Image (cartoon, helix red, strand yellow):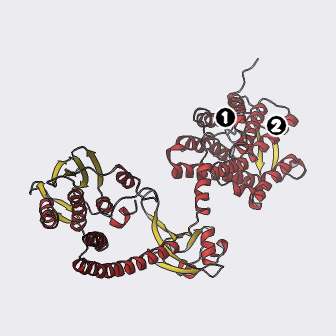
């Protein structure tokens, strides 16, 4: 019994490998691209088996029938592979378009023409058995439709390959090796088919594309069996990216380097009263009145109900993998409610601050006059209590003004000597309050920070320790606990008072006051805000000997004060 010719053995072996891969991948039916890949593998198996068996058959009629099956496998491999690439990479909607349906007509028509070729010879002519290497190879003259059909199928397969390479580039290492393997797997049989089609090989009648499916099967097995390619589908990530943009409540636009619109979401269509298909490719400024240089610009728009809405524009650059700018994104943030709230608070703050200070100053004076003129000791004591309460409210209002000025002016960071600041605070407080302030910080220590906020934070902490102390000799000690290697300075403000009540510390840690739980004043809040605005952290340690405020500050910072205030 003669040996099987090696081209036939190689082709049949490729078919067997394809069948094993086909059987394994059946478990993934229904996953993105899986059904189309199964169809491509079925066509591939038909291609390999029919060509391999055909090389063993010398009967002209049967050999012609097997050649028809080979051509059917060839022309039906490209379309499903392209559909696989589209669905697997998250572009499955294109498969369900009339355009893709038109592409399917090419293999349909080719199959009919090949099956009926003896009647018209549109695909080939001069069919004859022309053995080589002991195999029943055939020769025939290819006509125009044969070149057209195979080249179209090759383009389909190449397009699917390019989609997978795009996945390699766009989605990173999660899909990289598997997608690269599948993309490369199409090259050996594709090159073999083109070499045969254009007669570039040493033996014109020998088509080695079926044999070259062997490395194709090996690479696909690595990707789908060893690499679990269908376990992580980039279609999920692509769909998520698309949904994130489409469902984003903020208007979102993408423009190229020429500032022409290449994408926008439904929110942008609503705000600018446009339809996406009609504005793609149009100049951004003509459609929206904006340019990419309009960062932080505020625009006013009207809703269907006639409500005025205010939006701010934020732009950012789009860069490709090489760092080159390829476009810009524009996101519009609706700040109407925020602006209205800011305006209300600004008006209330200005009115209350002005009226409160003026009216309470007058009340303070009248209460003092009344206390001087009243002979009733009990009533005098009550009036003096009112006088002290008014002083407390005025002092609280002054603290708020001091903090407001510090946070609004926001000067750039400067070199600060903490000891000088602490000693200045100590002189002022010792003149106003009972007690003393001890500064145990070296004059050599310097920080680069905001001097005004630094002073506000420690002035409130030190004052809190003096005012609330119940000791006979109130005193506060300021010390430098450490200057860590990570450029963090840790200060302590220690008093000999009764300790800050637990409920007040709980309010600070929670970051908000409630109707049932609130602090006794603004001092600790202002200290907290100031420290966090400087990029630091404030904590408290309370024991029987008093309270220690621990302030951790970066030794060099230029903080975004308004952003840090949003805690």
Secondary element at image label 1: loop
The residue furthest right is: 119
Is residue 294 visible in the rendered structure shown here? no
User: Alpha-carbon neighbours of circle 1 within 10 Å: few (<14), some, or many (≥20)?
Assistant: many
Q: Could you say which is closer to the camera, residue 16 or residue 366?
A: 366
In the image, residue 460 above or below residue 494: below
Residue 326 placement (x, y as % from top left):
48, 66
2 or 1: tag closer to the N-terminus: 2
The residue depicted at 27 percent of the width and 46 percent of the height is 542
Quarter of the image where the C terminus is located: bottom left
Could you tell me how far apart the alpha carbons at marks 2 and 1 are, in whole angstroms? 16 Å
Q: Which residue position is annotated with label 2?
A: 66
Dot label at residue 211: 1
Q: In this view, does 193 lie to the left or right of 368?
A: right
Residue 320 placement (x, y as % from top left):
47, 60
Quarter of the image where the N terminus is located: top right
């Amino acid at each position: 019994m003669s040996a099987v010719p090696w081209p036939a053995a190689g082709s049949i072996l490729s078919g067997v490998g394809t069948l094993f891969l086909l059987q394994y991948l059946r478990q993934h039916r229904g996953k993105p691209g899986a059904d189309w890949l199964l169809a491509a593998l079925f066509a591939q198996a038909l291609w390999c088996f029919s060509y391999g068996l055909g090389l063993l058959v010398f009967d002209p009629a049967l050999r012609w029938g097997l050649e028809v099956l080979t051509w059917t496998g060839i022309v039906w491999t490209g379309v499903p592979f392209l559909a696989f690439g589209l669905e697997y990479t998250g572009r499955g909607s294109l498969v369900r378009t009339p355009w893709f349906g038109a592409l399917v007509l090419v293999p349909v028509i080719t199959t009919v023409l090949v099956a009926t070729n003896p009647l018209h010879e549109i695909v080939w002519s001069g069919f004859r058995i022309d053995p080589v290497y002991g195999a029943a190879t055939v020769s025939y003259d290819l006509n125009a439709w044969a070149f057209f059909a195979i080249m179209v199928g090759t383009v389909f397969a190449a397009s699917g390959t390019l989609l997978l390479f795009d996945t390699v580039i766009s989605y990173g290492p999660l899909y990289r090796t598997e997608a690269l393997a599948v993309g490369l797997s199409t090259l050996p049989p594709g090159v073999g088919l083109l070499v045969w089609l254009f007669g570039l090989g040493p033996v014109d009648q020998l088509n080695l594309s079926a044999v070259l499916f062997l490395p194709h099967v090996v690479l696909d097995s690595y990707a789908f069996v060893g690499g679990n390619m269908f376990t992580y589908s980039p279609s999920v990530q692509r769909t998520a990216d698309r949904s994130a943009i489409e469902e984003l409540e903020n208007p979102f636009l993408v423009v190229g380097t020429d500032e022409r619109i290449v994408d926008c979401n439904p929110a942008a269509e609503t705000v600018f009263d446009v339809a996406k298909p009609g504005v793609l490719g149009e100049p951004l400024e003509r459609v929206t009145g904006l340019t990419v240089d309009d960062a932080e610009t505020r625009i006013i728009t009207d809703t269907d109900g006639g409500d005025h809405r205010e939006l701010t524009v934020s732009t950012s650059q789009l860069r490709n993998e090489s760092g080159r700018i390829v476009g810009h994104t524009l996101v519009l943030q609706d700040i109407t409610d925020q602006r209205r709230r800011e305006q209300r608070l600004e008006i209330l703050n200005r009115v209350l601050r002005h009226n409160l200070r003026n009216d309470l100053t007058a009340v303070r004076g009248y209460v003092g006059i009344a206390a001087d003129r009243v002979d009733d000791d009990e009533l005098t004591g009550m009036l003096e209590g009112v006088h002290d309460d008014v002083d407390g409210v005025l002092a609280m209002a002054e603290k708020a003004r001091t903090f407001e000025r510090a946070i609004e002016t926001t000067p750039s960071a400067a070199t600060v000597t903490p000891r000088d600041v602490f000693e200045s605070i100590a002189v002022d407080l010792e003149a106003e309050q009972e007690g003393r302030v001890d500064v145990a910080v070296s004059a050599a220590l310097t920080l680069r920070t905001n001097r005004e906020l630094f002073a506000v934070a420690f002035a409130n902490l030190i004052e809190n320790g003096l005012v609330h102390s119940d000791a006979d000799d109130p005193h506060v000690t300021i010390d430098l606990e450490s200057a860590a290697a990570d450029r963090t300075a840790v200060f302590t403000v220690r008093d000999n008072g009764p300790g800050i009540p637990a409920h007040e510390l709980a309010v600070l840690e929670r970051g908000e006051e409630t109707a049932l739980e609130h602090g006794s004043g603004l001092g600790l809040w202002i200290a907290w805000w100031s420290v966090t605005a400087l990029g630091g952290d404030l904590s408290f340690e309370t024991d029987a000997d008093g309270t220690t405020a621990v302030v951790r500050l970066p030794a060099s910072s230029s903080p975004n004060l308004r952003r840090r205030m949003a805690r």
